[in-house]
Amino acid sequence: MTAPAINRLFIAGRWTDSVSGATFESVNPADTSDVVGRFQAGTAADVAMAVAAAADAMPAWRATPAPKRGELLYRFGALMAEHKERLARAMTREMGKVLAEARGDVQEGIDIAFLMAGEGRRMFGDTVPSELPDKWAMSIRQPVGIAGIITPWNFPIAIPCWKMMPALVGGNTVVFKPSSDAPHCATLLVELMEEAGFPAGVINLVTGSGAEVGDAIVANPDVRVISFTGSSHTGRHIAEQAGRRLKRLSLELGGKNAVVVLRDADLDLAVDGILWSAFGTTGQRCTACSRVIVDRHIHDELVSRLTARTQKLRLGSGLDESVDVGPLVNAAAVDKVDRYVAIGRREGDLVAGGERATGATLDKGHFYKPTIFAGVRPMATIAQEEIFGPVLSVIPVDGYDEAMAAANGTHYGLSASIYTRDVNTAFRAMRDFEVGIVYVNAGTTGAETHLPFGGWKDTGNGHREAGHVALDTFTEWKAVYIDFSGKLQRAQIDNQPG
């Protein structure tokens, strides 16, 4: 058998080994005998070298006109489009999502690259009237500095692009640490960035553990802004470290997203949206639907339809286009789901799934049957805690007000949806959901790159990704005044009587 390829760090425009000399494996979660590759176990010393490279590159990159920075983003986006199928297949092999979803993941990266490339010619500030004569007043954006980018495995192309594209077009340099469950996707991404022509040191890749590499990025005093997507537990840890150093910090954390189904809903449409939201990416999305809050009068009918459809879902390798649901990312994820299912058996009626999936091919990977619990109480453990797997709780309620109370009754606030034919109710829900993203007659997933992405409450710390507001994380505002009166003019004094 051919030995797996050994991949390297990317620092100062060169591919290099870690100073540790240690490596780790990335394996296919659908077939753990398939080793995707070996990757450098980076250290704090590697991070220090990457930060130094980013600091050296910063003055020239900052001085590069934003439209010229944008042209490199366009070139990178075009390369991703050219290599879309190769990237998608590599993604499915490394982290398991079915191929159609992997193609969508890559497309998100392409979309945000093109969107942020355009910001190179916009990047709006404000020009406003001064309160004094012969005086000009405006605001401009300028880069924060070196950006530490720490990303998860579940969207291994899209999320790094969501973060790096606004950082780069804004004039920042980057030190990028991907999840250790998806280092190959990150390596392929950086290879295309190198091919696109980004100058040496502008992008630096350090693979390795969160405890070793992630903490070193957060702790480094020269890294001025951190963007992290991952668990709420890790997010709080990073926030404590970053807060002590007064770093700018963008956190995109967990979710416990709800689909509300009212009595007048189109149930066929609702079932389609719920299944896609709950079991797409095997439930491993921050926007996954893990709660269905349904009017009690249609609870049994909806559960019956969901159960019948769920039991027909085909599990297997996502590289097989006939497969509906791929594996969980690793053995720990399977164990976590199994623990919550054990809790769910005490808190609801198990109507589908509830066990590890086995079979000739499934035994090779980390598979779990899509699981549904009916008759769950709103405050049950499985209705409150993020499971990050293919487990759905169906919660019966009486009417809109009770549905909204249940939907909002969690610590999270990322995404929510409502199925109703009543336009007035739909507008009430748009107002009442305590979340950052609302869908009407659609599931809880499907965000587009030109609108802000992020949530309320424990889902994050108020920053947004995607849309033009993504620039806010990676740019500083500067107010500029030009007085051409030729004399001293005192604001709030010389233009007031007395």
Image: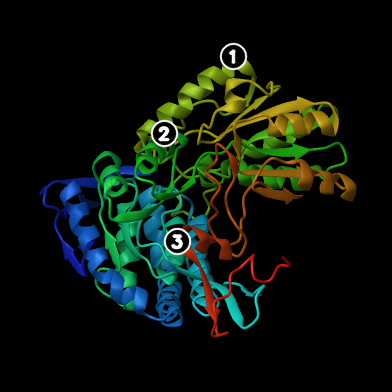
Amino acid type, callout 3: Phe
The image shows residue 412, relative to residue 135, as above or below, that is above
CA distance for labels 1 and 2: 21 Å
The location of residue 318, given as percent across then percent down, is: 46, 51
In the displayed structure, does residue 246 sit left or right of residue 368?
left
Q: Is residue 287 left or right of residue 376?
A: left
Residue 333 is tagged as: 2
Tell me the element at label 1: helix
**Mark toward the start of the polypeptide (3 vs 1):** 1
Between marks 3 and 1 in the image, the one whose residue lies nearer the viewer: 3
Nearer the observer, 497 or 34: 497
Place residue 12 in its image quadrant.
bottom left
Residue 8 visible in the current orientation: no
Q: Element at badge 2?
A: helix
User: Where's residue 439, x and y in %?
Assistant: 71, 50
Q: Earlier in the sequence, mark 1 or mark 2?
A: 2
Residue 123 image point, x, y percent: 53, 73
What amino acid is labelled 1 in the image? Arg
What residue lies at 57% left-to-right and 66% top-to-bottom?
468
How far separated are the C-alphas under marks 2 and 3? Answer: 33 Å
Residue type at mark 2 is: Ala
Looking at the image, tell me whether mark 2 or mark 3 is earlier in sequence order. 2
Q: Which residue is mark 1?
A: 346
Compared to residue 413, the image places residue 94 above or below, namely below
The residue labelled by disc 3 is 474
Q: Nearer the viewer, mark 2 or mark 3?
A: 3
